[in-house]
Image: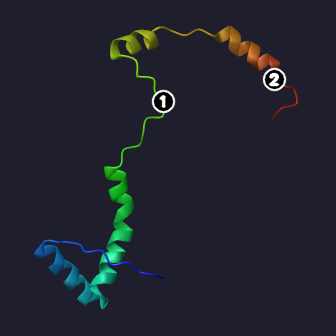
């Protein structure tokens, strides 16, 4: 696998933690950093990257939504019509 080198300024305490972990795991510091990035990148992505809006329609104002959803939607007739239209042999 081809590798690229990326200079990464790090605070001394983090470098020391990487070195200690590498020593305990008996691998290189570079390997610890690669594994840390692989393991942590999905969590960082989830935390930092916002999912774009799925619609360009703004949400209803709270007052309008409360009024709209407070009214009982009585569509019993259409439900009965839908049930009646179902094939008789459907399981």
Question: In the shown orientation, is residue 87 left or right of residue 10?
Answer: right
State the residue in front, 11 or 74.
11
Other residues around mark 1 within 10 Å, as few (<14) / some (14–19) / many (≥20): few
Decide: is 59 above or below 74. below
Q: How is the image coloured?
A: rainbow
- Residue 4 location in percent, x, y? 38, 78
Quadrant hosting residue 18: bottom left
Name the residue rendered at 31%, 51% in the picture. 48
State the residue in front, 73 or 32.
32
For mark 1, what is the residue? Answer: 55
Q: Quadrant of the C terminus?
A: top right
- Residue 57 location in percent, x, y? 45, 23
Decide: is 33 above or below 24. above
- The mark total stands at 2
Q: Residue furthest right?
A: 89
Mark 2 vs mark 1: in front: 1
State the residue in front, 10 or 22.
10
- Residue 56 location in percent, x, y? 46, 27
């Amino acid at each position: 696998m081809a590798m690229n080198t990326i200079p990464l300024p790090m605070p001394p305490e983090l470098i020391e933690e990487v070195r200690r972990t590498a020593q305990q795991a008996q691998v290189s510091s570079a390997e610890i950093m690669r594994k840390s990035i692989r393991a942590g990148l999905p969590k960082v992505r989830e935390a930092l990257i916002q999912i774009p809006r799925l619609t360009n329609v703004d949400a209803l104002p709270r007052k309008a939504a409360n009024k709209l959803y407070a009214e009982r939607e009585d569509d019993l007739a259409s439900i009965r019509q839908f049930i009646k239209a179902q094939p008789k042999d459907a399981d």
